[in-house]
Amino acid sequence: MARIAEITRTTKETDITVRLDLDGTGTTDVSTGVPFFDHMLDAFGRHGLFDLTVRCVGDVQVDAHHTVEDCGIVLGQALKQAIGEKRGIVRYGSSLLPMDETLVMAALDFSGRGGCWCDLDIPAQKVGDFDTELAQEFFVAFAQNAEITLHVRQMAGRNSHHILEAAFKAVTRALKEAVAIDPRIADQIPSTKGAL
C-alpha cells in the first residue's frame, strides 16, 4: 500500500501544497520563497529518502514566520496522513548527527500525542535572510500536526548554519528509522494499547 499524501492549505498568509512519499528515493522539488528554508527542506527529503514536493506562496514581504510555521503544519499533516494506522512501523527513531564541529541529537516517537522539545543554541540571529529562531517554530508545528513526540538537542556546535542543517538532517534520519516497516509486525500496530 502506497504511503503517499498530498495536502493543500490556504490562508490569508500562505498558500501551501505538500506531497510526501515515505517510500521514495529522496527526490525533492521545493519552493517556499525562503532560500535557506528551501535548502533545509531539500536536505529533509534527501536524507530521509522521502520524495518531497513543497510549493508555498507566503507573505515573505512581512517576514518568513508564517511561511516556515505553516509549512511545518502542512508537512506534519502530510506525514500523519501518509503513515495511516501505523501498522508495522518501527515507531521510534533516533539520530546523532555530526556536521563538522556540530553534533545534534533527534529522537521521535509516533505516539499520537504531538509535542516538541527543542534545545538549540544558535549563535546568529540570521543565516542568510532566515531568522534562526524559526527552526524551532517549524519543528513544533511539524510535531504537533504529525502527532509525534519529538526531541531535538544540540550536543555541540558553534556555526549557526551547521547547527540548523544538522538539526533538520537528524530529525529526518530519525524519521526514516521510525517509519520503516518491520516485516515481523507488518499487520500490527506497535503499541500494547493496540492503537496510536
Image (spheres, helix red, strand yellow):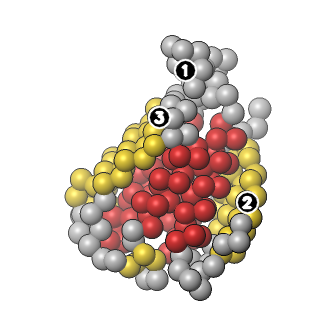
The residue where tag 2 is placed is 9
Left or right of 164 on screen, residue 50:
right
Q: Which mark is residue 109?
A: 3
Q: Nearer the viewer, mark 1 or mark 2?
A: 2
Give the side of residue 94 with respect to residue 27, left or right. Answer: left
Q: Is residue 8 visible?
A: yes
Residue 28, position in %: x, y? 65, 62
- For the point 50% across and 60% down, the residue is 138
The amino acid on which the numbered mark 3 sits, given as a three-letter code, is Asp
Image quadrant where one finds the N terminus: top right
Q: Nearer the viewer, residue 8 or 23?
A: 8
- Tell me if 25 is positioned left or right of 126 in this view: right
Q: Which residue is mark 1?
A: 190
Of callouts 3 and 2, the N-terminal one: 2
Label 2 sits on what residue type?
Arg
Q: Residue placed at 55% from the left, 32% from the top?
A: 112
Q: Is residue 40 above or below residue 26?
A: below
Q: In terms of secondary structure, where does tag 3 sit?
A: strand
Give the distance between the C-alpha atoms of the residues marked 3 and 2, in whole angstroms.
Answer: 25 Å
The residue sitting at 54% across, 15% down in the picture is 193
